[in-house]
Amino acid sequence: MGPIRNIRDVAEKHLCTGCGVCAYLEPDGIRMVDDLGQGRRPMVDEGAGAGEALEACPGKAMELPPFDPAKGHLKELWQGWGPILELWEGYATDDEIRLAGSSGGAATALSLFALEQGRSTGVLHTGARRDVPYLNETVRSQSREDLMVNTGSRYAPASPCDGLQQIEDGDGKSVFVGKPCDAAALNKAEGLRPGLSKNVDVSIAIFCAGAPSTEGTIEMAKQLGVPQREGIESVRYRGNGWPGMAVVKGEGADGQPTGGELTYADSWGRILQRFRPWRCYSCADHTGEAADISVGDPWYRDIPEGEPGRSLILVRTERGREFLKAAMESGALTLEKAAPHLLPDSQMNLLHTRGAVWGRNWACRLLGVAAPKYTRMGTGKTWLQDLSFKQRAQAFYGTFKRVFTKKLYKRRPVVPFDAKANRVGDQD
């Protein structure tokens, strides 16, 4: 498929993560749109996308710095999970936040702490579009009310980095919350834009097993009795319990109010994950290795029905350590130190995915298909040490099949979707 020369190549050669950093860095030539089958994707003007936008793109490449024992990172976790200084397990002390959050409400509690303590004037994250609730938009929350409206995971395309100008131009610092690829993009953008870096209070990444396309949400709504996308009135993927129910409300074929709910096992396990774009299958970072703090579910044990949520928190940088310490001292979080083994015990599927990526990407390269470049991320060693022979074979040969069934050997132009006009196709 040839070299990756610009952001259009990234998008059309199945490498785009949808983070939106390219639109922030080159706003005159790039804008983010919704592509129903792929996610948030960039529309690139002729001649744009070959400079800073490509340099910061996590879809093209990700890397970790060399391991340095003097920095205090946990060596036993480095290969599979990246830099980690400390692990904690716990929950938001505020019961309302803990209930509303997808696990223990840690990301929301940390965000609110920063606002209430005056450390930050805003939180840049993702929320449902008010006018099209099955789509996402980047929002900058400045109050508890704002945060609570947008709490809970969004298993749908999001591009929070397209709003980084709001942080750079902000009156004071901001918290950033996003997926692992979003945190990686922010990290690179901070290196390019000092004005952005000085205004980031902390970056928080949410563990991610992939971001389903909008078609996944539409299919879930259909199975819950809302047959037309324009009839969807609200979508919640998790929260209000641990892990919480997926809930869709809207209008049925007869014009009457309808909707329903699905367990996490049914919504994610049976429907949504089937709609992940290929780039999610070739991603090595599912836990936010470039963030200051990462949060996810501690799935190392069975969760009894009705148990309040809990979060696993990874401290990755000194900036993150200082922030979390201050949050704990303020009483925003109730935490206890977690043993290193609880991370692989909780998220072994993500470790296996990291290893499988090595085989998937080499299979792509052998077939002339574009694949992301990973530097010092240990995918090869994880492939050899943590995957069985069967898992390695499935990753390698399964990719050969997907290259043809998904037509990864062909460029796929971005197909924008105008939700208000309910129209798929070119947009001026």
Image (spheres, rainbow, N blue to C red):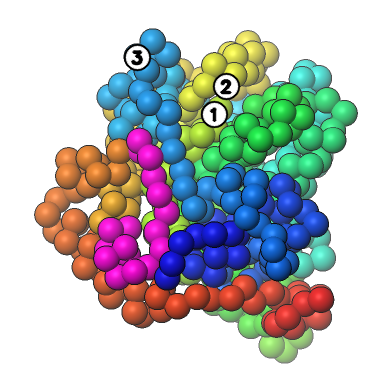
Marks 1/2 in contact by CB < 8 Å: the verdict is yes
Q: Quadrant of the C terminus?
A: bottom right
Q: Is residue 134 visible?
A: no
Along the polypeptide, which appears first: circle 1 or circle 2? 1
Q: Residue at x 25, y 44 (%)?
A: 380
Q: How many marks?
A: 3
Q: Which residue is mark 1?
A: 293
Q: Is residue 304 above or below residue 389?
A: above
Q: Residue at x 30, y 44 (%)?
A: 379
Q: Which of the 4 image quarters holds residue 135?
A: bottom right
Q: Residue at x 60, y 14 (%)?
A: 322
Q: Which residues are magenta?
A: 360-377
In the displayed orientation, state which residue is furthest to the left.
389
Give, as a three-letter code, the residue at label 3: Pro
For marks 3 and 1, give the CA distance: 20 Å
Marks 2/3 in contact by CB < 8 Å: the verdict is no
Taking the image as shown, residue 37 lies to the left or right of residue 84, namely right
Q: Nearer the viewer, residue 145 or 198?
A: 198
Give, as a three-letter code, the residue at label 1: Ile
Q: Nearer the viewer, residue 269 or 387?
A: 387
Please, what secondary structure does the residue beneath circle 2 have?
helix
Please, what secondary structure does the residue beneath circle 1 have?
strand
Q: Which residue is mark 3?
A: 69
Please, what secondary structure does the residue beneath circle 3 have?
helix
Where in the figure is residue 155, as x and y percent of width and height?
56, 57
Q: Is residue 342 above or below residue 241?
A: above
Number of the label disc, if any, that sits on residue 320 = 2
Q: Residue at x 69, y 88 (%)?
A: 253
